[in-house]
Amino acid sequence: MQHSPVIGSGIPALDSILQGLRLGDNVVWQVDGLDTYRKAAIPFVRQALLDRRRVIYVHFIPHCDILTPLSGFLAEEVDPRPGFDSFSAQLNKIIDENGRGVFYVFDNLSALVAEWATDELLANFFQLTCPYLRELDTVAYFALTRGQHSHSAVARIRDTTQVLIDFYHVGDRLYIHPLKVWDRYSSQMFLPHLLSNGILTPVLVSGDASAISQTASKSPLKVKADSIAPWDSVYRKLAQYSEDELSFLEATPEIQALKQELSQMIIGGHPEFRRLADKYLTLNDLLSIRNRLIGSGRIGGKAAGMLLARRILLNDSSELDFSGVLEEHDSFFIGSDVFFTFLVNNDLFRLRLRLTRNSQISPEEFEKVEERFLAGSFPQEIMEQFKDLLAYFGQAPIIVRSSSLLEDGFGNSFAGKYRSEFCVNQGDPEERMEYFLRTVKLVYASAVNPDALSYRHLRGLGESDEQMAILVQRVSGMRYKSFFFPPLAGVAFSHNLYRWTDRIDPNQGIIRLVFGLGTRAVNRVGGDYPRMIAVSHPQLRPEVGCKVATYSQREMDLLDLSANDFASTPVARAISDLDFPNLHLYFSFLDDGYLREPSGPRLKSLKDGILTFNRLIARTDFVKIMRTLLAKLEKAYGYPIDMEFTAFVDAEGRIKINLVQCRPMRLTGLTEVASIPEDIAPDCILFRANRTISGGTVPNIRYILYIGAESYARKASLELKQEMGRIVGEINRHPEIVRQQIMMMGPGRWGSSNVALGINTTYADINHTSVLVEIAREEAGHIPDVSYGTHFFQDLVESQIIYLPLYPDDPQADFNLEFFQNSPNILSRILPEAQRFEEFIKVIDVPAVTGGRFVQVVADPRQQQALCFIRDHEC
């Protein structure tokens, strides 16, 4: 396409961002006052006159002038008071008489509503005038007062104009945020920019952008005003009051009843959630949620947990004022009703019903189901609200997260069962919308993925009302070079099940901390280890000496803005310039087998650098803040909690936390006292383990699924390794196995996506096991990850599966390799089609080998000891 000459706006920094104006552009400025509009209009007129352009100022009688007299431009007056017809005719005559290539500045269009009393006529005027001006190769400036017009009128103007820009104050600072720039694109075009001394500085830190955007856009979504549904009826009754009036009237019976009704509609009816919502959420909180809710329905457990946790912390500032610690959030919510509308409109409802009742689906079948979801479409009203959402965030990365009604609830976390999808959110508006819609549909499809169905079935939730709401969050972090990521992220637990020394107080919790996106903290990844911080003794580590380097993080997850995709990269490569803020708080250095800390705030090299976060722990309030935060949330919930977070250290050394997610933990049975028997005959012992997290006793284990570490590492082809997870899953679901107790033992990390590091199973492949053992043989490259805090471990916790890392080479392990190698393999009998895996996967029928005896496992997390032995009156 051949573009017209570039036209200057009079603000060079803006021209750089917009790539200039073009002949035919209509430019609409959404402003917070006439003085703000003048800051855009006057430079434009001066530049146009300097470029020897004809400029006409169209003044609406009898309203205030935008432009003071300047030599060189022509002022034309039009009177809107006689009505739309007369006004349009006057303006049409002016445009006709002045012809092509003229530049125009119009008074604030909001003044027309004062005369015509309707937004509809305002939108009609713009849709009539804008295309005509474009045909004549003009450049025209218009203004709208922000927040004064209906969303439908603004949408019509947005769809018609070529350029739409938000121009507003937050405090005494002035911001420019382009919302639409037709046929132009740059990597920072749609971000909010601070205007100061003629310089536009993009807002690159998520917390700053959130605070600015939320202040500037109180009601960012189009909402139909004519609905008679109870939802909107209750909302309208409450919305007639101001915030101050609601605070004053909230205790009255009428307002209390309306609040209860609105809370039921938004949060739901679970007694514990209702208790917390009634205590901590105000009416203004609920109305704020409604203002950011797309469609209708509930917001789901994940969204409710995040909002409640924030409010719990902000309401009580007796020990620590969290208003100075927590980042602002400006999340949006896609209501659960939209999920059902999508299913019904795209002929997917019966498919979901069938899959839910059946509770089993293969990965191959699920891929076809995903394709059907991806082919679906949304109603026009919802699409308009999606446009508002994307316009609000601009090019800021966002994450689309499942928030089903059952998710993050009391007893069922659904950790990692449903999808969360990053939208790096780069490209032009059409590209960004296409990718956003894809992520929403993938989250919807995940409601029937194999892991989710297995999880629901095991917990008796197969017939429960499971609607999928969605939480859309701004990704917390900052732009650095062509990347976007937070410096700190992780998961934290108010109760610590992983005590590697008796000095640790389990009631003060534990933190699993990484550099970059928190995906590396909740997923099992290869060759990398997060920093485990016991809150009671933060400087203690499970590792000592040079082992600290072995068990540390080397790679990081981030968003690659240039590739518009999620990526993993070596930490040293991502921050090779060493100018990323506060690196001295995160890195230590290995020197002759000893750790040393950086000598100053600026690192000279990352050679021998290790991510320990030692100075963050020792020299900032990070651990103190997390300790207080975890204790407050556990006290309010009445249960231990786990939470996901991001964090950063600001220029003054203060810690800022973004609370991403919060849910209660289910610990039933995992902290029970289990005494290790001392009188077991040596020939009855199968193994000892000296690292355990969960406790308890599992008697009467009939089957053992055993995959040898050496044969897996040295003999199994890549193809066989990739298929082993599927075979394990078929054994796990076999009717003969399900009726009995089974223990699974395999090399390295169960649940790893990297087959070189372990068996690539999912939750649905191991959910019937009673004990899961990870066999570590370092010479074979298999090192278990005590992955406390990952979604995989959360599955084990909730299913009360005892998890044991086992080091056969440790003299204290008492590993009976002969038993596992020489016992007969019944794999071909129970799964004839898996015969070619017999060399690697062994299923042992214990009573058939031991003369009718069973295996028992006893694990004591306090002593970090576990024993597996053959039960017998002689043992």
Image: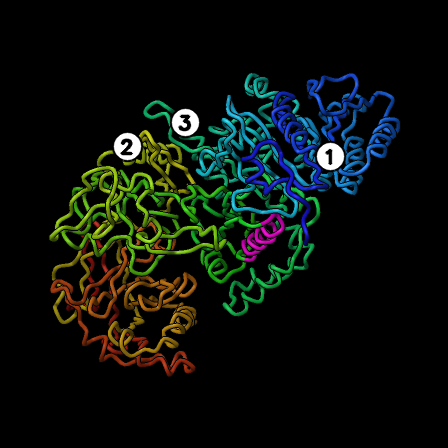
Rendering coords of residue 145 (x, y %) = 67, 26
Can you say whether 364 is above or below 43 in the image?
Answer: below
Q: Which mark is residue 234?
A: none
Q: Can you say which quadrant of the picture contains the N terminus?
A: bottom right
- Residue 503 placement, left or right of 28: left
| One can see residue 238 in this view | no
Please report the residue visible at 31 percent of the width from the left and 76 percent of the height from the top: 842
Residue flagged by tag 3: what amino acid is it?
Answer: Ser
Q: Secondary structure at mark 1?
A: helix
Q: Secondary structure at mark 2?
A: loop
| One can see residue 545 in this view | yes
Q: Are marks 1 and 3 in contact (CB under 8 Å)?
A: no
Residue flagged by tag 2: what amino acid is it?
Answer: Asp
| Residue that mark 3 sits on | 323
- Give the magenta-colored segment's residue range: 428-445
- Spatial CA span between label 2 and label 1: 49 Å
Rendering coords of residue 840 (x, y %) = 31, 77
- Residue 231 placement, left or right of 136: left
Q: Mark 2 or mark 3, which has the lower sequence index? A: 3
- Residue 195 placement, left or right of 524: right
Q: Which mark is residue 153?
A: 1
Does the magenta segment cover residue 198? no
Q: Nearer the viewer, mark 1 or mark 3?
A: 1
Residue flagged by tag 1: what amino acid is it?
Answer: Ala
Q: Are marks 2 and 1 in contact (CB under 8 Å)?
A: no
Does the magenta segment cover residue 443? yes
